[in-house]
Amino acid sequence: MAPPERVLIAGAGPVGLVAAANLVRNGIPVTVIEAGPDLSDESRASTFHPPTLDMLDDLGIAQSLIAQGLVAPKFQYRSKQHGLIAQFDFTGIADVTRHPFRLQCEQSKLTRILLKSLAENPDFEILFSSPVRRVDQDGSHVTVTIDREGHTDTQTGRWLIGADGARSDVRRSLAIEFDGFTWPERFLVVSTPFNFHSVVPDLVSVNYVADPGRWHFLLEIPELWRIMFPVSAGESDELALSPGFAQSLMANLVSGISHYEIAHTTLYRVHQRVAKTFRAPRVFLVGDAAHINNPLGGMGMNGGIHDAVNLTGRMIDVWRKTKPDTEFDRYDSQRRLVTKEHVEKQSIQNKKDLETAGPDFRKRLIQIAADPNRTREYLLSVSMITSLKRAEELG
Ligand SMILES: Cc1cc2nc3c(=O)[nH]c(=O)nc-3n(C[C@H](O)[C@H](O)[C@H](O)COP(=O)(O)OP(=O)(O)OC[C@H]3O[C@@H](n4cnc5c(N)ncnc54)[C@H](O)[C@@H]3O)c2cc1C
């Protein structure tokens, strides 16, 4: 019997499910294979950039996501010492995006909206509690070996998309190197229902606060604020997760407020890594399986969604035989290059800016904010429109 003609996707995170949605709406059958018993509800990404919202709109789900999130047209850079340095407004690029704002919304809301939109489609199938353990391929198909309820099973398809996150078993099974490094410090995310607008009147929903001692970002999502601080190598995980530690960091945010209601604290190890290749040859890496970076600038999930849309657009053409198989080489060259040139560079620069908080950083931001041309260029870059344009130019 001929193997089934479908696409396998390992991982039901935001990137795997966006890939599934684009394929299924174009009539391509998909089987998503997810290790967990359900969709993850971990609190990680909470910022969607304008072009990502345009892509989700093309998939018919942006309105549901916007209804569950918070529209943030402005963001600010502050320093602990000098207060507000500069404010930027995405309405300045409303001519190039249908969504001139950041959407503040947890990634777990996106995955639930996507799954609901796919669930009834006969071209969509999802297997939970089914970790992929091994990948084999020949000239026409890929077979994955999965664990299922204590026994081993296999699934076969025409291509496999590895969207199984930073520790990707797909990537490991193919022995693809994941070059880069791990930062010595970790990041602590503290969430609180405290309303910072009530004590800092000109605050917006997205604020980066530079400080050589302890920088932080202050992001509003529906019903909560998330504050992220670095935790130095000398501070143990145990100390960082003790309730007194989070309170002591929070006590430095607003003078006169020394105690906050804390909803969650989560400690993250932070890496900068990019896979040696995103294609091998019937298997494709996307999202965190292909690249990970520090979360400053909110580019990990957004970049992963851009990978998924780029790759699945090519799959649709090759499936319909309107383009040859060599199309896939361009997925690798375009997305790997922009990840290195833009996402990696920018996220490292963002971290450096916040932790040095020096006069050069302040001067640069003030000059950008004062010059309409530079402001526009800056907004196009931080919203990731520049990286998408660069990928297109690579042909
Ligand atoms: C504190 C923090 C804040 C962040 N903020 C932002 C932000 O604002 N904006 C942004 O763009 N990014 C942000 N990120 C990064 C973002 O969370 C990730 O880039 C994003 O989750 C990547 O999505 P993914 O679908 O590639 O992988 P994941 O979300 O990790 O999903 C992978 C899925 O694969 C499954 N899986 C794992 N192994 C297997 C296996 N062997 N077989 C089958 N399934 C498997 C997992 O269970 C999971 O469901 C942040 C990250 C952190 C830590």
Image (spheres, rainbow, N blue to C red):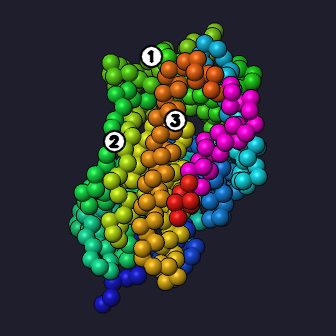
The image's mark for residue 296 is 3
In this rendering, does residue 191 appear at all?
Answer: no
Other-residue count near label 1 (Cα within 10 Å), few / some / many at <14 / 14–19 / ≥20: few
Residue 103 drawn above or below residue 63? above
Return the x and y of residue 22 as percentages of the image width and height.
Answer: 55, 68
What amino acid type should be assigned to the residue bearing mark 1? Gly
Q: Which amino acid type corresponds to the residue marked 3 in the rendered image?
A: Leu
Indicate whether residue 333 is drawn in magenta.
Answer: no
SS at badge 1: helix
Judge whether residue 331 can be spotted in this image.
Answer: yes
Question: What residue do we see at 70% from left, 37% from top?
Answer: 375
Highlighted range, magenta:
366-389
Q: Which mark is residue 314?
A: none
Report which residue position mark 1 lands on: 244
At 53% across and 64% down in the image, what residue appears? Answer: 395
Marks 2 and 1, how far apart in space?
A: 34 Å
